[in-house]
Amino acid sequence: MDERPIAPALKVLAALMFLFLLAPLVVVVPISFSGDRYMTFPPSSWSTQWYGAIFADGRMVGAFWTSLALAAVVTTLSLAIGLPAAYALVRLKPRGAELLGSLFTAALLLPTIVLGLAILIVFARFGLLATFPGLVAAHLVVTLPYALRVLSTALSTLPIAVEEAAATLGAPPLTVFRRVTLPMMRSGLIGTAALCFLVSFDEVVLSLFMTGPRIATLPVAMYHRVEQQADPLVAALSVLLVVLTLAVVLVVDRSAGLAKTFVK
């Protein structure tokens, strides 16, 4: 069946929405190339000095490596926990599977600031504040629902007949999962990893509750930088983070396809 043509009015509306979402870049990008000592728009002079200042700032560099390590660990744990949980809900179909799925993703319904305050109260009792394990646990509360949802969608769209055929030919359940199910879930796994990485790397509200003088993530360091110094360094760093996000999205699109990954 031929696809219905998109109405011109809908195309115009979509273009306006894209312009609205991308409007902040019109301000941020020029400011990142400013030669001024303070954020001004439009800049009175042009320079790339603030991009060099990022790498000369030890606090920002250290916070970047902390965020990178944190996002990598959180992504790995999200896949390790979310994959068997999604398989159990979709393939084994236990009693109350829909209720369990809603319960596991309920954290996404709470405002992040309320979730952060609750985590702060609980983690303070166990001495997990301003520690790397505490940050990992806090970020998992947010990333695991995303991982479970994407992986469940990926599993539910797979043809179960292929797995049954492998089992009929004598393959043990673990072999079926490793040799048949996982390769067919490739796009879902890549999409889940990218989504969890970006959510963890960019998380600022939970990190504000969990960080301290001993440890800070990059979004928190940027937040404090804006409070203390209103210079264009944060704008330059924001541009680099936008580029990093686009790079991750392009990798997902090239390796798995965005529509195939996130659309059921």
Image (cartoon, rainbow, N blue to C red):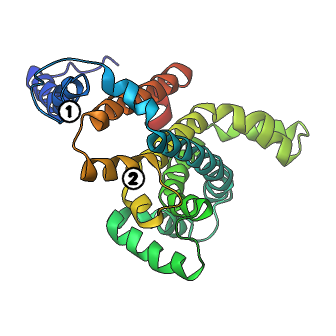
State the image quarter where residue 54 is shown.
Answer: top left
* Marks 2 and 1, the one that precedes in the sequence: 1
Mark 2: few/some/many CA within 10 Å (<14, 14-19, 20+) = many
Which residue does the numbered mark 1 point to in the structure image?
Answer: 37
Q: Is residue 264 visible?
A: no
Which residue does the numbered mark 2 point to in the structure image?
Answer: 220
Residue 6: image x %, image y %?
19, 21
Can you say whether 112 is above or below 59 in the image?
Answer: below
Mark 1: few/some/many CA within 10 Å (<14, 14-19, 20+) = few
Q: Residue at x 57, y 37 (%)?
A: 188
Residue 161: image x %, image y %?
70, 38
> Left or right of 170: which side holds 228?
left
> Left or right of 42: which side holds 180?
right
Q: Residue at x 49, y 46 (%)?
A: 63
- Distance of mark 2 from mark 1, alpha carbons? 22 Å
Q: Quadrant of the C terminus?
A: top left
Q: Choose between 243 and 236: the one closer to the eye.
A: 236
Q: Choose between 131 and 44: the one closer to the eye.
A: 44
Q: Give the amino acid at mark 2.
A: Val
Q: Give the amino acid at mark 1.
A: Arg
Residue 74: image x %, image y %?
59, 51
Q: Choose between 74 and 163: the one closer to the eye.
A: 74
Secondary structure under the numbered disc 1 in the rendered image: loop
Can you say whether 95 is above or below 154 in the image?
Answer: below
Q: Quadrant of the N terminus?
A: top left
Q: Is residue 250 visible?
A: yes
Q: Residue at x 50, y 33 (%)?
A: 261
> Left or right of 35: which side holds 193?
right
Which numbered mark, 2 or 1, is in the foreground of this view?
1
Q: Choose between 240 and 59: the one closer to the eye.
A: 59
Secondary structure under the numbered disc 2 in the rendered image: helix
